[in-house]
Image (cartoon, rainbow, N blue to C red):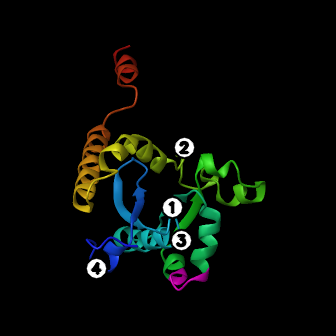
């Protein structure tokens, strides 16, 4: 039985988590509240449409089930928009390793033109870092849950922005320049 304190259509449903979209630099582009349905196609579908409308053409979208999601996209009304925008799906390295060989040849991120050495596991890093947040927001009201999530990911993004210009091995880079 839903709580009597909840009002409005969305507040009747329980929030079960977040669906995040992260760029290759680890910066969170946007978060979607998952509501009682778990990880269904509606979240990546909404993400794909928002990415196309925000960033335009030529997007490579790494997703745990990029192969299946690619087929889903092509069958839906959004399929024309996806094709026109050259929006491509691929499967991240860790999850792609479990897929069969034919799927890997078509969708594994390491075999995608333009992906470079990316592994497509940016969301895994984000979720790993945010695990400590679960204890803080577990029993929080929706307002404080959203506030804490916002503060956490704002700090996450700030740190990522600060590190964008830093070479990964600063000492080695300086050593090469000095010798």
In percent of width and height, residue 17 lies at 41, 58
From the image, state whether disc 4 or disc 3 is nearer to you: 4
Q: CA distance from mark 2 to mark 3?
A: 27 Å
Relative to residue 102, is residue 2 drawn left or right? left
Relative to residue 141, is residue 101 drawn left or right? right
Q: Compare marks 4 and 3 and give the one earlier in the sequence.
A: 4
- Numbered mark located on residue 94 in the image: none
Q: Which residue is mark 2?
A: 117
Q: Is residue 110 visible?
A: no
Q: Compare marks 1 and 2 and give the one earlier in the sequence.
A: 1
Residues at badges 2 and 3 in contact (C-beta under 8 Å)?
Answer: no
- Numbered mark located on residue 41 in the image: 3
- Numbered mark located on residue 61 in the image: 1
From the image, state whether disc 1 or disc 2 is nearer to you: 1
Q: CA distance from mark 2 to mark 4?
A: 46 Å
Q: What is the magenta range?
A: 75-80
Q: Nearer the viewer, residue 127 or 137?
A: 137
- Numbered mark located on residue 8 in the image: 4
């Amino acid at each position: 039985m839903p709580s009597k304190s909840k009002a409005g259509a969305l507040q009747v449903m329980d929030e079960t988590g977040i669906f995040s979209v992260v760029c290759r630099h680890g910066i969170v582009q946007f978060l979607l509240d998952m509501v009682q349905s778990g990880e269904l196609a509606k979240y990546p579908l909404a993400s794909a449409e928002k990415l196309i409308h925000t960033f335009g053409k030529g997007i490579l979208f790494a997703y745990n089930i990029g192969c299946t999601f690619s087929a889903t996209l092509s069958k839906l009304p959004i399929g024309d928009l996806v094709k026109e925008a050259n929006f491509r799906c691929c499967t991240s390295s860790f999850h792609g390793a479990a897929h069969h060989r034919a799927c890997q040849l078509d969708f594994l991120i390491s075999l995608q033109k333009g992906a470079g050495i990316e592994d497509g596991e940016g969301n895994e890093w984000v979720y790993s870092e945010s695990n400590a947040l679960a204890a803080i927001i577990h029993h929080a009201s929706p307002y404080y849950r959203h506030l804490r999530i916002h503060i956490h990911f704002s700090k996450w993004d700030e740190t990522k922005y600060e590190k964008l210009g830093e070479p990964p091995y600063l000492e080695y880079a300086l050593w090469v320049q000095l010798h």
